[in-house]
Amino acid sequence: MIYFIEDDKSINEAVFYSLKNSGFDVKGFDRPSEFWSAMKEQLPSLILLDIMLPEEDGLSILRKIRKNSDTLNIPVIMVTAKDAEYDKVIGLDSGADDYMTKPFSMLELVSRIRALLRRTSKPKEPDVITIGKLSVNPEKHIVTANGKNVVLTYKEYHLLLLLMQNKGVVFSREKLLNKIWGYEFDGENRTVDVHIRSLRTKLGECGNMIETIRGFGYKIGE
């Protein structure tokens, strides 16, 4: 579902029919109050937002969207007549994902919507990842080994989650260091090895599932 907030009736109707004909479900609103009422009923996949609106300007709406934990990740495209570079910078810095100025091509609008939805769509994580007697709940950040909760540090948790999400895949120390810590392996850094040892200790018997591939790195198996 796409929500479009625009007080110009002709533009509202043109966008509505263009998106409908492109296969999108869409609802148009000419007043922010109507938009906020709809947000209580159903959250959209994407929002098209004008800046100059009655009742409340679009930038104020955008900031509220980005401050709310339920809506902060909804992609937003500003669609406005304000085409100065300053206005674009303000819109993007306030949390807009894209910025289009009027008049605009409906084909380009549809293309940008599709591109933004592709970039922001994420595959749904399974509720719980389980291998043998070891389980990780990615949503709740809960780890259990042999039925008991295990308390891990932030890095230990993400290291284990990466291995669990890629069962059987061998990760080099360099790749693990880059993915989890965000910096390059210099051949001497023992950070990964230290965290693997700590993980194995905390996981008890399940720690044996983390296998060392001599001279290369680690993987997780049964």
Image: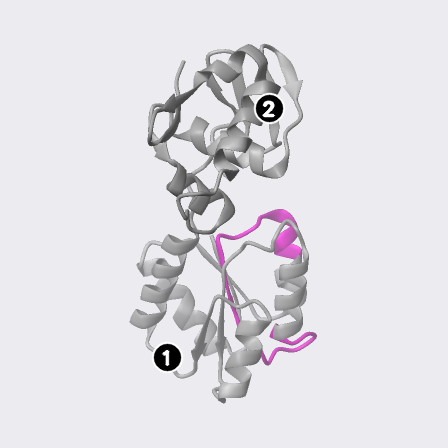
User: Which residue does the image show at 44% across and 43% down from the upper left?
Assistant: 188
Task: Give neighbour class at mark 2: few <14, some 14-19, many 20+ (Cα, 10 Å).
Answer: many
- Residue 76 higher or lower than 149, as above or below: below
Q: Does the magenta run of residues contain 97?
A: no
- Residue 181 higher or lower than 5, as above or below: above
In which quadrant of the rendered view does residue 122 lie?
A: top left
User: Which residue does the image show at 34% across and 24% down from the upper left?
Assistant: 213
Tag 1: amino acid: Phe
Residue 41 placement (x, y as % from top left): 62, 48
User: Which residue does the image show at 64% across and 34% down from the upper left?
Assistant: 153
Q: Magenta span covers which residues?
A: 37-58
Residue identified by numbered label 1:
104
In which quadrant of the rendered view does residue 104 lie?
A: bottom left
Residue 84 placement (x, y as % from top left): 49, 89
Relative to 211, is 81 on the left or the right? right
- Residue 28 higher or lower than 135, as above or below: below
In three-dimensional space, the C-alpha distance between marks 2 and 1, rounded to whole angstroms, equals: 50 Å
User: Which residue does the image show at 68% across and 74% down from the upper left?
Assistant: 56
From the viewer's perspective, is the residue at label 2 or at label 1 nearer?
2
Given residues 157 and 32, the one toward you in this image is 157
Residue 194 placement (x, y as % from top left): 54, 32
Residue identified by numbered label 2:
143
- Look at the image and tell me in which quarter the C terminus lies: top left
Residue 19 placement (x, y as % from top left): 37, 62
